[in-house]
C-alpha cells in the first residue's frame, strides 16, 4: 500500500494506524505514538522486571497475571498521555525539526485543545487501572506524574533530559514490585536505577538523529553533550546499569529464592549486557537510520532479563 501523505516521519512502515485505523482517529493515535510501539515496550519492560523479579523472590501469585496485564494497558495509555503532553509542550519546537514537523499538532491535524482533551481521557483510563492495585502501588503511580510533567521541559535547561526520561520511564519497576509484594524494597530500587542507566544509553542513541536540528534551535541532549565520546560514555552506562541490575537480582533472590534462582537471574543480566555491547559495536552516531534501528532493538534487550527472571520463579 502507498505510504499515507499524513504519516509521521519516523513511524513504523505499514503500521496499523496508517493502514486500518479510522481516518478521524489517526491524529489522536499518532499523538499517542500508537504507530511507533517501541515506546510502549520501553515503558512496560521495567514493569515486567519488577513483577517477575518480585515473583521469583517471594513466590508467584495468580494476581501477578493481572499486574502484568494492568501494566501493559497502563503503559500503552500513559505512554500515550506522556507523548501527548510532550507534543503539546513542544508544539513550537517540533515544527523546526525535520523528524518531528509531521507530528499532528505542528502539521495542523489536531488543535491544542483537542490534544488536551485526549490527554485527559488517556490519563483517566490509566488511573482506573491503577486503582486495581494495592494502596502503596497507587501512591507510587500518582507520584510518577511529577516526572512525567517535568520531562518535556528538561531539554530546555539541562544537557541531561535523558535522566528525566529515565526517572519517568522506569518507575514501573518500583510500582510493579510493590504491586506484587505490597511494599517497596531495595531490589526494586536497584532495578529502577539500572533502568535509568539503560534509558540514558538508548535515548542518547535516539537523540543522535536530531542533534543538528537541536543544536540550531538550542535544545539540549546527551547526544550533544557526549559528542564524539558517545561510544565511551555509553559503555560506562552499560556497565553501570548491568552492575545495578546484578545487585537487584542478588539482593532479591539469594535470601528469598536461593542461589540457583539468583544464578539464573544473573544470566539474564549477562544477556542484557551483551545485547547493549552488540549495539555499541554497530553504533554509527552520524547515521540516523542506524541510530533508529539500534534504538528500536532495545525492546529485545529489555525482554532478556524478563525471560530469565520468569525462569527463576521455578527454581
Image (cartoon, rainbow, N blue to C red):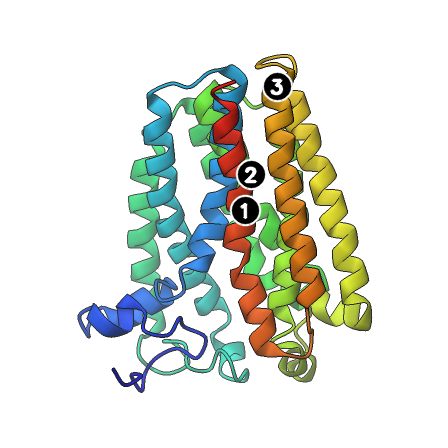
- Where in the figure is residue 9, as x and y percent of width and height? 43, 79
Vertical placement of residue 142 versus 203, above or below: above
- In the picture provided, is 112 more to the left or to the right than 212? left
Task: Residue under label 3, please give it.
Answer: 260
Mark yes or no: residue 158 visible: no
Task: Residue under label 1, please give it.
Answer: 302
Vertical placement of residue 248 versus 57, above or below: below
Between marks 1 and 3, how big is the CA–CA gap?
22 Å
The residue sitting at 59% across, 77% down in the picture is 288
* CB contact under 8 Å: marks 2 and 3: no
Secondary structure state at the residue bearing disc 3: helix
Between marks 2 and 3, how big is the CA–CA gap?
15 Å
Q: Nearer the viewer, residue 307 or 8?
A: 307
Q: Badge 1 local density, few (<14 within 10 Å), some, or many (20+)?
A: many
Task: Residue under label 2, please give it.
Answer: 305
Secondary structure state at the residue bearing disc 2: helix
- In the picture provided, is 50 more to the left or to the right than 269? left
- Where in the figure is residue 69, as x and y percent of width and height? 33, 37
* CB contact under 8 Å: marks 1 and 3: no
* Number of callouts: 3
Amino acid at each position: 500500500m502507498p505510504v499515507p501523505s499524513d504519516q509521521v516521519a519516523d513511524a513504523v512502515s505499514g503500521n496499523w494506524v496508517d493502514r486500518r485505523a479510522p481516518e478521524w482517529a489517526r491524529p489522536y493515535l499518532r499523538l499517542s505514538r500508537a504507530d511507533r510501539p517501541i515506546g510502549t515496550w520501553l515503558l512496560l519492560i521495567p514493569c515486567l522486571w519488577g513483577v517477575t523479579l518480585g515473583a521469583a523472590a517471594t513466590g508467584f501469585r495468580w494476581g501477578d497475571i493481572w499486574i502484568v496485564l494492568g501494566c501493559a494497558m497502563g503503559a500503552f495509555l500513559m505512554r500515550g498521555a506522556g507523548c501527548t503532553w510532550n507534543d503539546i509542550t513542544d508544539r513550537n519546537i517540533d515544527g523546526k525539526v525535520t523528524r518531528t514537523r509531521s507530528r499532528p499538532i505542528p502539521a495542523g491535524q489536531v488543535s491544542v485543545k483537542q490534544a488536551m482533551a485526549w490527554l485527559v481521557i488517556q490519563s483517566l483510563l490509566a488511573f482506573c487501572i491503577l486503582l486495581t492495585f494495592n494502596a502503596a502501588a497507587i501512591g507510587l503511580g500518582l507520584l510518577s506524574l511529577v516526572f512525567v510533567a517535568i520531562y518535556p521541559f528538561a531539554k530546555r535547561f539541562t544537557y541531561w533530559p535523558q535522566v528525566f526520561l529515565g526517572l519517568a520511564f522506569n518507575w514501573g519497576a518500583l510500582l510493579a514490585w510493590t504491586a506484587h509484594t505490597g511494599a517497596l524494597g531495595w531490589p526494586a530500587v536497584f532495578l529502577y536505577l539500572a533502568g535509568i542507566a539503560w534509558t540514558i544509553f538508548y535515548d542518547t542513541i535516539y537523540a543522535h538523529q536530531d542533534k543538528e536540528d537541536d543544536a540550531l534551535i538550542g535544545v539540549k541532549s546527551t547526544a550533544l553533550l557526549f559528542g564524539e565520546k558517545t561510544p565511551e560514555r555509553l559503555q560506562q552506562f552499560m556497565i553501570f546499569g548491568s552492575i545495578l541490575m546484578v545487585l537487584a537480582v542478588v539482593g532479591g533472590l539469594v535470601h528469598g529464592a536461593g542461589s540457583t534462582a539468583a544464578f539464573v537471574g544473573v544470566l539474564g543480566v549477562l544477556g542484557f549486557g551483551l545485547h547493549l555491547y552488540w549495539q555499541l559495536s554497530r553504533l554509527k552516531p552520524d547515521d540516523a537510520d542506524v541510530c533508529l534501528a539500534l534504538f528500536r532493538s532495545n525492546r529485545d534487550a529489555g525482554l532478556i532479563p524478563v525471560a530469565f527472571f520468569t525462569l527463576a520463579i521455578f527454581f
